C-alpha cells in the first residue's frame, strides 16, 4: 500500500520546519490514535489570480472571502507583461483583409525587400509553419517600426511612449531575438474577430488568399476545436482565426503573436486576447488592425485604461497594398460560393466569405 503522508500539527516544531500549513484539515483521533477527539488545523489560504479581477464587492461576495487582502503586482489595474510588445496598424476599412495578409507575409519574411511577394505560410507543420511568426514578432516588428514610414507617411506618435522614438523601440526589442528563435521551431499567429460569423468568413478568405488558416469558434464541432488546440500546442497550427471563445483560459506556448482583426469591445476583452501570448516570462507581440472609424474609440479606450499604444506602418505599406489588391478582389469574388458549399461549422481547410 502507498505510504500516507500527513501534515504536521500547527504549532509543532515539524510544522515550523515545514513552513506552515496551507490547507485545512481535521484529524480524528488523539495523539494515541483514540477516537472521539478532533484536532483542528489552520484554515485554508485561498490565492486567486486574475488579469482583470473585479473590485466590485457585490461580485466578490459569492466567493465568501474572509479577511481578504488585495495585491496588485504590476502597479496598474490593466497591465500587460513587460515581455509583450503591443502595436496598432491603421488603414481604410476595405483594406483591412489585405493589411492582415501583408502583416502575415511580413512576419514570414521581415527582412525581404518585397515581403508582400513572399508566401504567407501558416501551414500545418511544414516549412511555411516554422519560425514564421517568431521572426515577425521578434525581429520583424522592430524593423518595421523603424523603417515603416514611406513617402511622407510618418507613423502617428502622439500616444506612443513619451520620449521614445521608433528607432529606440527597435533597438530595445532586437536584443535576444536569436535566442528566442533558437528555442522555438514552430509558432502560431492567433487572430481574433468580433463574432462567430466573422471568424468563419475571415478564415475562409485567408484560405483563398493562400494562408492555411484554421477556424476556432463555438460553431466548430468540439472534436475539430480539440484538434486545433492540440495542433497549436504541438506547433503545427501556423494561423488560427478565433472568436472570443479562445480569449480566456487557453494556454499554448507556441503563440508568439496575437492579431486583433476586429478591435475588442472593452479593455478586459483586449487584455484577455493579448494575454494568449507573452505568458510565463516568454516574449510575445500583439497587433491591432484598425479602420479609420475604429481608431478613435480604440485609442480612447486605451487612454482611459492608462495603456500605451504604439503605431506601426509596414515597410512600403502603400505600395504593398496597391500591388496586392488584385489578390483580394479575386478572393472576394470566390467567397460567397465557398460559404454556400461548406456547411457552417465545417473544417476550415479551404474557402472564404463576403467582404470583411
Image (cartoon, helix red, strand yellow):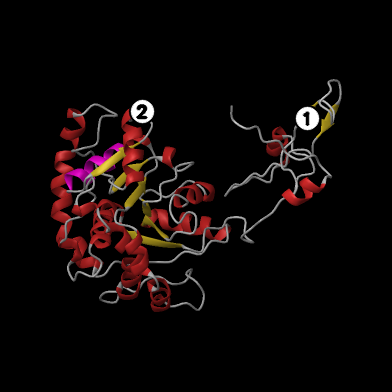
Q: Is residue 342 magenta?
A: no
Tell me the mark number nearer the camera, choosing from 1 and 2: 1
Instruction: Give the quadrant of the C terminus.
Output: top left
Specify the segment rendered in magenta: 200-209
Disc 1 to disc 2, C-alpha distance: 42 Å
Q: Are marks 1 and 2 in contact (CB under 8 Å)?
A: no
The structure residue drawn at horizontal position 48% and vertical position 68%, both measured from the top left corner, is 159
Task: Find residue 14 and report its horizontal and vertical position in percent.
Answer: 77, 46
**Residue 121 visible at all:** no
**Which of 33/118 is in front?**
33
In the image, is residue 219 above or below residue 73?
above
Residue topped by disc 2? 222
**Which of 318/243 is in front?**
243
Q: How many marks?
A: 2
Q: Is residue 203 magenta?
A: yes
Task: Find residue 4 and report its horizontal and vertical position in percent.
Answer: 65, 32
Task: Find residue 80 and report its horizontal and vertical position in percent.
Answer: 52, 58
Label annotation for residue 26: 1
SS assignment at label 2: helix
In the image, is residue 3 above or below residue 265?
above
Residue 135 is left or right of residue 3, and the answer is: left
- Residue sitting at the far top: 36
Task: Find residue 299 and report its horizontal and vertical position in percent.
Answer: 48, 59
Instruction: Give the quadrant of the N terminus.
Output: top right
Residue 330 is left or right of residue 57, and the answer is: left
**Residue 269 visible at all:** yes
Amino acid at each position: 500500500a502507498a505510504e500516507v503522508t500527513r501534515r504536521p500539527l500547527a504549532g509543532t516544531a515539524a510544522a515550523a520546519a515545514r513552513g506552515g500549513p496551507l490547507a485545512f484539515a481535521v484529524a480524528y483521533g488523539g495523539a494515541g490514535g483514540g477516537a472521539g477527539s478532533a484536532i483542528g488545523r489552520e484554515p485554508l489560504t485561498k490565492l486567486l489570480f486574475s488579469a482583470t479581477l473585479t473590485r466590485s464587492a457585490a461580485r466578490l461576495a459569492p466567493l465568501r472571502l474572509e479577511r481578504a487582502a488585495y495585491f496588485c503586482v504590476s502597479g496598474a489595474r490593466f497591465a500587460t507583461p513587460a515581455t509583450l510588445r503591443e502595436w496598432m496598424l491603421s488603414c481604410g476599412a476595405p483594406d483591412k483583409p489585405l493589411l492582415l495578409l501583408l502583416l502575415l507575409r511580413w512576419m514570414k519574411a521581415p527582412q525581404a525587400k518585397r515581403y508582400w511577394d513572399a508566401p504567407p505560410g501558416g501551414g500545418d507543420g511544414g516549412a511555411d509553419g516554422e519560425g514564421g511568426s517568431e521572426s515577425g514578432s521578434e525581429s520583424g516588428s522592430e524593423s518595421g517600426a523603424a523603417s515603416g514610414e514611406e513617402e511622407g507617411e510618418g507613423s502617428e506618435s502622439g500616444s506612443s511612449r513619451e520620449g521614445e522614438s521608433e528607432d529606440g523601440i527597435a533597438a530595445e526589442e532586437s536584443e535576444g531575438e536569436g535566442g528566442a528563435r533558437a528555442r522555438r521551431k514552430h509558432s502560431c499567429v492567433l487572430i481574433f474577430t468580433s463574432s462567430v460569423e466573422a471568424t468563419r468568413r475571415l478564415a475562409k478568405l485567408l484560405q483563398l488568399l493562400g494562408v492555411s488558416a484554421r477556424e476556432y469558434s463555438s460553431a466548430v464541432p468540439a472534436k475539430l476545436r480539440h484538434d486545433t488546440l492540440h495542433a497549436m500546442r504541438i506547433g503545427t497550427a501556423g494561423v488560427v482565426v478565433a472568436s472570443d471563445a479562445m480569449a480566456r483560459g487557453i494556454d499554448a506556448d507556441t503563440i508568439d503573436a496575437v492579431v486583433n482583426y476586429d478591435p475588442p469591445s472593452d479593455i478586459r476583452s483586449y487584455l484577455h486576447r493579448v494575454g494568449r501570448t507573452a505568458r510565463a516570462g516568454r516574449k510575445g507581440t500583439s497587433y491591432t488592425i484598425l479602420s479609420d472609424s475604429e481608431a478613435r474609440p480604440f485609442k480612447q479606450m486605451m487612454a482611459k485604461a492608462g495603456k500605451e499604444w504604439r503605431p506601426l506602418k509596414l515597410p512600403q505599406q502603400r505600395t504593398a497594398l496597391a500591388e496586392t489588391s488584385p489578390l483580394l478582389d479575386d478572393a472576394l469574388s470566390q467567397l460567397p460560393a465557398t460559404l454556400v458549399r461548406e456547411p457552417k461549422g465545417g473544417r476550415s481547410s479551404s474557402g472564404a466569405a463576403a467582404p470583411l
